[in-house]
Image (spheres, helix red, strand yellow):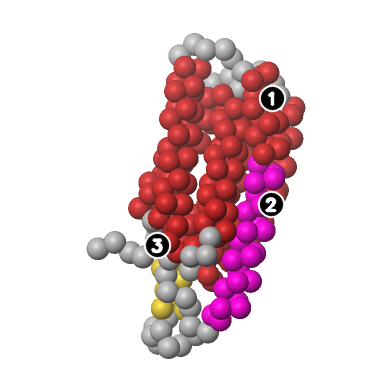
Amino acid sequence: MSLPMIDPAPAGLSPARRQVLARRVRLLVAATIAYNVVEAVVAITAGTLASSTALVGFGLDSVIEVSSAAAVAWQFAGRDPESRERVTLRIIAVSFFALAAYVTVESTRALLGGAEAEHSSVGLVLAALSLAIMPGLSYAQRRAGRELGSRSAVADSKQTLLCTYLSAVLLVGLGFNSLFGWSWADPVAALVIAAVAVKEGREAWRGDACCTPGPGPAGPATSSRTTDCAGGC
């Protein structure tokens, strides 16, 4: 039996509060899009110059994150966001799969004898900057999405959180390559990015945006709520 794409509104959540949360989601999505457009341009340019598969993959993840955020913006721009939920989740899932496919092919090519990645100071700074910025954006959107009961908003916040993990992986890969000349660390880091993208894509496709609100033990008439979280959320 399939689950509804948006859970019933929490008890005590007034229409005015729903409007506030929807507006907050739109603002956070706009901020995410703006940052990731800049991040994508810088990462792809720097990655191409340094022959870094991981850095290019990171830039493409930023492009995909823009498409994911844009899908959520499209959803909440309509009069009935609930009716657009399933399509939005599908767009997010496909974007994850597209990233995984590209990064896997390019990483395999690099490991089998492609061009070795060079040092990239720009890439190191960008990874560190994203590692500092992305967690805050993800937390704010996830919190609003949970309260609103929007699976797509939570799924998009997971895409933003993925950027944090990828920033850490990228920083390690680029760092090892720069410090020790381990050029293989770059495509290996990219393969980690691909594996995580596949996992998140599968969850988005199934609608398993974890930690959306569910009725509390006292039933729907009470304001007490619990979270319906999958393991590891």
Quadrant where the N terminus is found in the figure: bottom left
Left or right of 31? Residue 170 is left
Q: Residue at x 59, y 27 (%)?
A: 56
Front residue (pair 109, 189)? 109
Give the mark nearest the N terminus, 3 or 1: 3
Q: Which residues are magenta?
A: 13-36
Give the mark nearest the N terminus, 3 or 2: 3
Q: Is residue 188 visible?
A: no
Disc 3: CA contacts within 10 A as few (<14), some (14-19) or many (>=20): many
Three-letter amino acid code of the residue under disc 3: Met
Badges 2 and 1: C-beta atoms under 8 Å apart?
no
Disc 1: CA contacts within 10 A as few (<14), some (14-19) or many (>=20): many
Give the mark nearest the N terminus, 2 or 1: 2
Mark 2 highlights which residue?
31
Q: Residue at x 65, y 46 (%)?
A: 33
Disc 2: CA contacts within 10 A as few (<14), some (14-19) or many (>=20): few
- Residue 204 to residue 219: above or below: above
Mark 3 highlights which residue?
5
Residue 181: give x, y in percent of width and height: 64, 19
Residue 131: give x, y in percent of width and height: 67, 45
Mark 1 highlights which residue?
46
Three-letter amino acid code of the residue under disc 2: Ala
Residue at the left extreme of this rendering:
1
Left or right of 11? Residue 175 is right
Quadrant of res 195: top left
